[in-house]
Image (cartoon, rainbow, N blue to C red):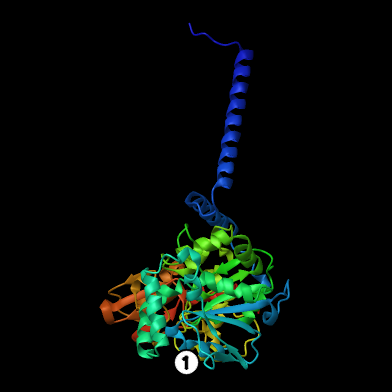
């Protein structure tokens, strides 16, 4: 016969068990929270948890409202007084810099600039903007002069820099350009931290520090309206997100924006972190990733809510996606030729209001065929691919053996969720490419291209009035 506890003893035992389990749960949660708080900001476990929590929040809550785009500014900003643009260049790309300034319209509010590179411009050969001479500061030398790198004189990057410097000083321009072309990308990683140090030392009162490459174009009406919604005394780190969970970083070419609070926190309150960053410059392939890791160590993470506002491509090739169709756009990248940079400046010189992604189409004064409701096929044009690579892996779906352009267009509409634009070519096995974006596009021989008109029209109707 089984022994049974009296009911009152059973209730007491069960109550005690519940209390112990609750206590164990609280202790476990408290222990995990304590461990979380004790972990360094750049700890892999902490970064992984943060990354997944942010993904869940984004999936559940979506992005912040963008009704601010044409609303009165919350914090009026004067770009002339409040912003500094740090233009990152190099000996091998210096021909772009003057074109960068020429791309600024006569109405440009940007006034203060800092040019940084891997060489020092000589007197009477500085760049000029509105009558003011702008020298190039050799921040690579500034980095290599740090005490933490004093025993690294035989490092390959140091040797490459010394070779470039010697060639420049000897007046051998051809050899200098060869060296700059072969090692410029490696030396670029040594510019970021020292550039920020120099910028803050010269302009400590600025509210916003904008780091760009010499092939980056800023759309000032969009930039001004965006910054007018933010508080520079908040630790902002903004840009076009790339990278894995362990180092989500802002793509340098798309422009990086740092608030005054972020700069002050990094450069005045975290000198050991800055020194560590200098020591890592010789081993880090990408300076923009090094900057992110450095900021993470101070507790400042990339604010990914705004990453869709930055483009890492040229105006014609910027991918207009469904998730940013009606959003403003702040920047372009990869305007490698001076001619292309100046042309982009002329394209936007009379713009007075924020530019939306869908406005890229209008800026080229091109008709919007989806508005007619009739399928339009453009001959010898591509609204999908990249003319530099032509890589089918850059699009979502590729079919072969599609006999006609009309059949390709039908496939696009059939796969409406993944297709906004399509391109068909009889070459390479009657290839049909479809993408979840569309671009203003480029010339492409033997290619026919078009849009998923119903989907594009529906997306455009969701845009707020402007």
Image quadrant where residue 459 sits: bottom right
Q: Nearer the viewer, residue 146 or 338?
A: 146
Q: Nearer the viewer, residue 371 or 309?
A: 309
Q: Nearer the viewer, residue 202 or 239?
A: 202
* Vertical side of 265 occupied by 20: above or below: above
Note whether residue 67 is visible: yes
Q: Position of residue 208 (x, y in %)?
A: 64, 73
Residue appearing at x 57%, y 55% in the figure: 57
Q: Position of residue 271 (x, y in %)?
A: 58, 61
Number of callouts: 1
Which residue in the rendered view is the most extreme toward the left? 429
Disc 1 designates what residue? 339
Residue appearing at x 53%, y 71% in the figure: 194
Q: Nearer the viewer, residue 29 or 15?
A: 29
* Vertical side of 206 occupied by 46: above or below: above
Note whether residue 364 is visible: no
């Amino acid at each position: 016969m089984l022994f049974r506890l009296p009911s009152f003893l059973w209730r007491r035992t069960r109550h005690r068990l519940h209390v112990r389990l609750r206590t164990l749960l609280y202790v476990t949660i408290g222990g995990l929270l304590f461990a979380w708080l004790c972990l360094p900001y750049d700890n892999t476990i902490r970064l992984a948890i943060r990354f997944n929590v942010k993904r869940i929040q984004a999936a559940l809550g979506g992005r912040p409202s963008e009704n601010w785009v044409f609303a009165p500014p919350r914090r009026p900003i004067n770009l002339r007084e409040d912003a500094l643009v740090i233009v990152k260049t190099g000996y091998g790309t210096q021909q772009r810099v003057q074109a960068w300034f020429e791309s600024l319209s006569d109405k440009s509010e940007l006034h203060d600039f800092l040019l940084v590179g891997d060489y020092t411009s000589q007197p009477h050969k500085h760049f000029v903007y509105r009558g003011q001479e702008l020298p190039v500061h050799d921040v690579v030398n500034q980095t290599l002069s740090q005490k933490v790198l004093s025993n690294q004189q035989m490092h390959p990057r140091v040797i490459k820099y010394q070779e470039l410097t010697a060639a420049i000083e000897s007046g051998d321009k051809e050899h200098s350009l060869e060296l700059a072309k072969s090692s410029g990308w490696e030396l670029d990683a040594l510019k970021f931290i020292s550039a920020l140090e120099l910028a803050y030392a010269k302009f400590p009162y600025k509210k916003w520090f904008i780091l760009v490459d010499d092939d980056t174009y800023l759309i000032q009406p969009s930039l001004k309206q965006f910054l007018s919604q933010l508080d520079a005394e908040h630790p902002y780190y903004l840009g076009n997100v790339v990278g894995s969970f362990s180092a989500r970083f802002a793509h340098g070419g798309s422009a990086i924006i740092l608030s005054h609070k972020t700069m002050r926190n990094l450069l005045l309150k975290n000198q050991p972190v800055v020194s560590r960053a200098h020591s890592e410059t010789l081993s880090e392939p990408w300076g923009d990733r090094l900057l992110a890791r450095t900021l993470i160590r101070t507790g400042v993470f990339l604010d990914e809510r705004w990453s869709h506002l930055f483009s890492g491509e040229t105006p014609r090739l910027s991918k207009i996606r469904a998730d940013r169709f009606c959003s403003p756009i702040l920047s372009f990248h990869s305007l490698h030729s001076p001619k292309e940079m100046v042309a982009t400046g002329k394209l936007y010189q009379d713009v007075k209001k924020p530019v939306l992604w869908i406005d890229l189409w209008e800026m080229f004064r091109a008709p919007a065929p989806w508005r007619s409701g009739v399928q339009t096929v453009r001959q010898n044009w591509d609204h999908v691919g990249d003319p530099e690579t032509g890589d089918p892996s850059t699009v979502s779906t590729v079919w072969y053996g599609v006999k006609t352009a009309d059949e390709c267009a039908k496939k696009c509409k059939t796969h409406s969720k993944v297709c906004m634009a399509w391109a068909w070519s009889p070459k390479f096995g009657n290839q049909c490419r479809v993408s979840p974006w569309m671009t203003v596009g480029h010339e492409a021989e033997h290619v026919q291209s078009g849009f998923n008109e119903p989907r594009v029209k529906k997306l455009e109707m969701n845009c707020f009035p402007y």
